Image (cartoon, grey):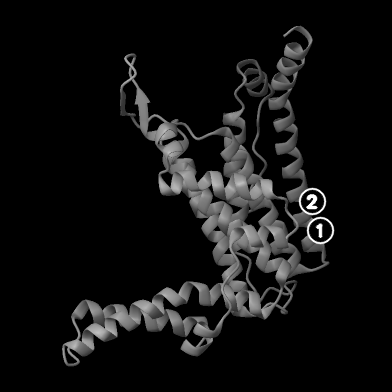
Amino acid sequence: MELPEFPYIPDEVIRQSKEHGDFAPVFFEWYKYVGRLALLVSNIERNQPNVSQHTTAHDFHILIGLLCRCARLMFSNVVMSHEGRFGESTAIVDRCILESSIKVIWLCESQTVDAFKRYTADGLKAELELKDNILDAVEKRQGRALTIETRMLKSIDQCIERSGLTKEDILAAKKLPNIASMLEQLGFNRLPYIVTQKIGSHHVHGTWVSLWTHYLTETADGVAIPRDSDCETHVNQYIVVSKLVLQAIRSFVQSIFEQTDTATFFFEIITSAESEIDSIFRLDMEDDTKTETQENEFG
């Protein structure tokens, strides 16, 4: 895969965005770029000469799988949001991307066999529970399994086999920390958790806030009615997701390349992308700052 080029944003587009106070189209282009970069990095092969071998093949596959997940979900959001629709859906998907990004960072920073084992076992405990339920049902039929049950048992066994863990390993593994604990261990303050998880949970669980943000609207008479699918993706989604995925890419690169020219090459790209996004964000904030200053002076 070729290294994606930074998005070309003409000065006229920046001027118009500033004039209308809407930088969403600009951040949308950077969101696409970060998704492409994540996909590129997820395609790095472990057997390349400059890749450190201290990460096992299993652990390496977890990391590239999570980055691939981030990239593909970002591409899904690009398709859904490019016409200014389905913002209710992109908010749900972005929460999934943020969670995967945090897990990449946590796993790379932890760099312990236990961390990857806990991640793997966490996803398999539900599979074991399902397997036990199926086997109980089969036993009640004197050992006669339904075709669908046979397929499910085979799928579960294959998934467990790929993990390299036994049933005993899975059950004995410590519970995976929640996202709040991961962020705390990584040295983040409480705000990223509130933004990415607590606020994001509105859209996943369909809270009262979510209903009035995306699914209900009011008539002139004050009557609540279902809203049409006309919700745009909020500009903050493009910014927050892009920056956190870039952090995940940096953690992955640092983990697998250590101190090499390749690592330096990617660090420079990531830092430049972050700098570009931050510079646009500062432009976006200028009008808010000016308005606030004027209100303080004359309000």
Number of numbered discs overlaid on the protein picture: 2
Which residue has dot 1 on it?
264
Q: Is residue 217 left or right of residue 47?
A: left
* Residue occupying image coordinates x 51% and y 81%: 163
Q: Quadrant of the N terminus?
A: bottom right
Q: Is residue 174 above or below residue 28?
A: below
Q: Is residue 240 above or below residue 123?
A: above
Q: Quadrant of the C terminus?
A: top right
Q: Tag 1: residue type?
A: Thr
Which residue has dot 2 on it?
268
Q: Is residue 289 left or right of residue 59?
A: right
- In which image quadrant can residue 84 be found? top left
State if disc 1 and disc 2 touch (CB < 8 Å). yes
Considering depth in this image, is 79 or 242 the residue closer to the camera?
A: 242
- Packing grade of label 1 (10 A; few <14, some 14-19, many >=20) is some
- In which image quadrant can residue 63 be found? bottom right
Considering depth in this image, is 69 or 232 the residue closer to the camera?
A: 232
Q: Where's residue 263, x and y in %?
A: 78, 62
Q: Residue furthest top?
A: 298
Q: Tag 2: residue type?
A: Glu
Q: Identify the secondary structure beneath mark 2.
A: helix
Q: Where's residue 179, x and y in %?
A: 60, 59
- Packing grade of label 2 (10 A; few <14, some 14-19, many >=20) is few
Considering depth in this image, is 191 or 118 the residue closer to the camera?
A: 191
In the drawing, what numbered circle is on residue 64?
A: none
Res. 164 in view: no
- In which image quadrant can residue 211 be found? top left
* Residue occupying image coordinates x 34% and y 77%: 130
Q: Where's residue 133, x and y in %?
A: 30, 80
* Residue occupying image coordinates x 57% and y 30%: 25
Q: Is residue 293 above or below residue 78?
A: above
Res. 165 in view: yes
